[in-house]
Amino acid sequence: MSRFVIIGAGAIGSFLSTRLHDAGHEVLLIARGARLEALRNMGVLLSEGGAERQVRVPVSAACDPATPPDHAILATKTFQIESALALLEPLRGSRFTLLTVQNGVEAPGIAQAALPRAVVLGARMHGFFELEDGIVRHTGVPATLLAGPVADHATDPAAGQASANLAGDLIAAGVPTTLTGDMRPALWDKFLMAATIGAVAPAFGLKVGQVLSHPQASALLREAMAEVERIATALGIELPPDCIDEKLDFIGRFPPDVTSSLQRNLEAGRPSEFVHLSGAIPRFARQADLPCPATDEILARLRARGLQPD
């Protein structure tokens, strides 16, 4: 059995901790504040398939440098990544596999810079998870993971074996996991939608599910997606040729009242993933030496509506 440290006790971190704990692995779930106290008192409350259960996963506010993990999972929001990595600082001298499951495309690089000895894998998790009233709810499709390196570890045999060991542990714990040799296209493919629709909707005062029925918002969304696709290409990332149409078709099936977490946080004035999603597009455009007028218009519309992203 393997030793896991999971940083972040939100919906995904808590869900993965229960699966790995149930499979017999040694799991330490790192949490803070009220969430830590709730977990100490009640354990993880998990709702799946209409049934609710309580899982007593070991929890702590900090890692134990005396017992380094075989694998760590970084399961916080992107705007919490620096503070999450600080919790792993005591393990900086250890070599372990680190899985990042954040939105955006920058988390693996940030993690690798902070923990140079770690084998860092980016990941894209499929499934619907939410933490509401202290209960982790997993609904809809079964959870699956796509994971892989974004740097030179792709050619490191030892790193490849470590990645395979992590994938095997997750699969055995009921989280089907597929490894890819280069995770960047999948991360950018998800980024293309999350970074655009999450800002276009609030820029027009619409729900995400209403954007495609609004001609101006719909056109601007497509233009912004095309900008992201061009930026990715210029940075050496090859996206599927039909990625924009596929994303628009997916959005078109949303109920009219659907919103994104980015939109909800922007409109409520809460900390958000804006800097690593919509706000990252101009930064990447400068790296690629490309303009991004559609994104610039979206950001201007957000400011005009009094939404000042962090």
Image: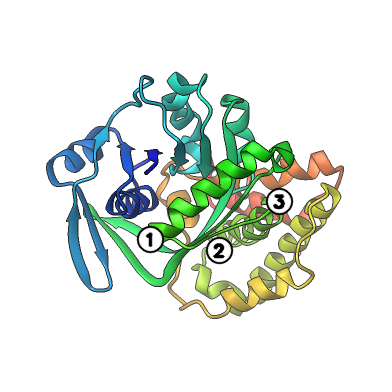
Q: How many marks?
A: 3
| Percent coordinates x, y for residue 160 in the rendering | 63, 44
Crowding near pointer 2: few (<14 within 10 Å), some, many (20+)?
Answer: many
> Which residue does the numbered mark 3 point to in the structure image?
182
SS for dot 3: loop
For badge 3, the amino acid type reads: Asp
Q: Is residue 259 above or below residue 299?
A: below
| Percent coordinates x, y for residue 168 in the rendering | 49, 53
Callout 2–callout 3 Cβ contact below 8 Å: no
Q: Is residue 169 left or right of residue 49?
A: right
Callout 1–callout 2 Cβ contact below 8 Å: no
Alpha-carbon span between mark 2 and mark 3: 31 Å
Crowding near pointer 1: few (<14 within 10 Å), some, many (20+)?
Answer: some
The answer to which of marks 2 and 3 sits earlier in the sequence is 3
Q: Tell me what residue is drawn at x 45 percent, y 38 percent.
A: 72
The answer to which of marks 1 and 2 sits earlier in the sequence is 1
Q: Quadrant of residue 141?
A: bottom left
The reply to whether residue 143 is in sight is yes
Alpha-carbon span between mark 1 and mark 2: 22 Å
Q: Tell me what residue is drawn at x 46 percent, y 23 percent.
A: 91
> Which residue does the numbered mark 1 point to in the structure image?
129
Q: Tell me what residue is drawn at x 34 percent, y 23 percent.
A: 64
> Which residue does the numbered mark 2 point to in the structure image?
201
For badge 1, the amino acid type reads: Phe
The answer to which of marks 3 and 1 sits earlier in the sequence is 1
Quadrant for the N terminus in the image = top left
